[in-house]
Image (cartoon, grey):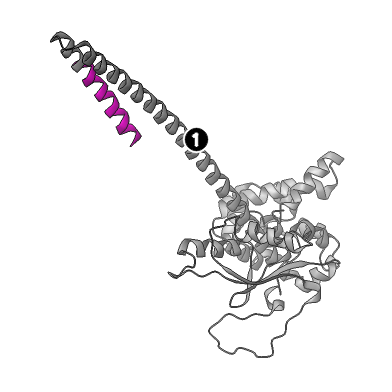
Amino acid sequence: MVVEREKVAYAGSAILIIAGGVLYVTGAPAAITLLSFLFSVGSGVFGWRKQREVKTLESAMDSLLEEKKGLKEELEATEERKQLKSQRLRNLKQVLDREGIDADYLIEKYGQPLKAPLLVLTHFNSDKGWNTEEGEQYIRNRLEELDAKVLHGATRVIPPRSVDQEIETREELEDWFHDEVLGGRDDLTYKLELMSIVDLRQVFGQDRAGDDGGQFEMNTIDELFDTDPVVPTDDLLDILARSDRISMEDELRENVALLAIPYASESQMRDIIQHQPSIQSNLGDITQIGNTDIERIEQVLEEHDVQGAEELATGIQEEARSLRPILDGELSETQEDIATERATELTGT
């Protein structure tokens, strides 16, 4: 619309200038000629101002589009990091399952309150004032990213590793819900019937009904966290380092599954754990794996039906070479800090 007005203004200015020239040549009264000239100048100025407005608007639009593009890329990168962290935790859980390390054990070893949000949240979409399909799916996706687990219907519990353990007040809990569950959006429709923080050390569930064949998902809190590494990921490796069931040093030296955690898919992890003794026999300990050609690691993985072995073999060798100096005690104090940070990446911390 602004562009059209600019064109009209310039066209009108040109017509009035021509008309003024014709009037002057034909001897029209000076007042009419002057009036025509003034109108032509006014139209020209109006067109120039509109052109300036158009350029300003175009510049603002370009800035907004660039900002939106940058924000989209940032959100995509954040989502990718969350997915990678979640995958690493699922991989680690498979290793812990094999060692008999369950949620109860981790909670006991943690030794302090383990805060988990418990919420009853209705957020479906409908044509009667609730969310659009996009809005409903957005909330669902946010809950999945937090690894929320369904107890029954709209009742969910979120594992401690997904929440700030420093939350103390109702206001802090409200802020966390708005930022983490709603993603900071104020346009979403929902009914939050209840939200509270529970300490997993002080709650329990029991199922004496058995399989009732119901159509709705129903779980006890014990079942949800039965084999889930519930503790904050910052503290998980520390607990495992103090564990009386697993020696992290021995495991890192002789457990190829741990080396695969940051790189493997869930199905790759299952195959490696299933064939771990045989794979380990072929590849040796962490020092030998670090010195083994990638092609050989890939060949051994393929022999044990591990799909996508090429990229995974590269990651396993890289992990072995990164962790070997830690186990051999060859690092300076500064290098140890860097190596310790590298080791925590097993869980995506």
Q: Position of residue 202 (x, y in %)?
A: 81, 75
Q: Secondary structure at mark 1?
A: helix
- Does residue 290 appear left or right of residue 183 in this picture? right
The front one of 111 and 69 is 69
Does 174 appear above or below 191? above
Amino acid at circle 1: Ser
- Whether residue 327 is visible to the viewer of this picture, yes or no, is yes
Q: Is residue 92 left or right of residue 242?
A: left
Q: At which x and y percent is residue 245? A: 83, 68
Q: In percent of the image, x 45 and y 36: which residue is there?
A: 61
Q: Residue at x 81, y 65 (%)?
A: 246
The N terminus - image quarter: top left
Q: Residue at x 18, y 10 (%)?
A: 24
Q: Nearer the viewer, residue 29 or 185?
A: 29
> Is residue 282 one of those drawn in magenta?
no
30 relative to 147 in the view: left or right = left
Q: Quadrant of residue 41?
A: top left
- Percent x, y of residue 315: 64, 50
Magenta segment range? 1-18
Residue beneath disc 1: 63
For residue 235, what is the image quadrant?
Answer: bottom right
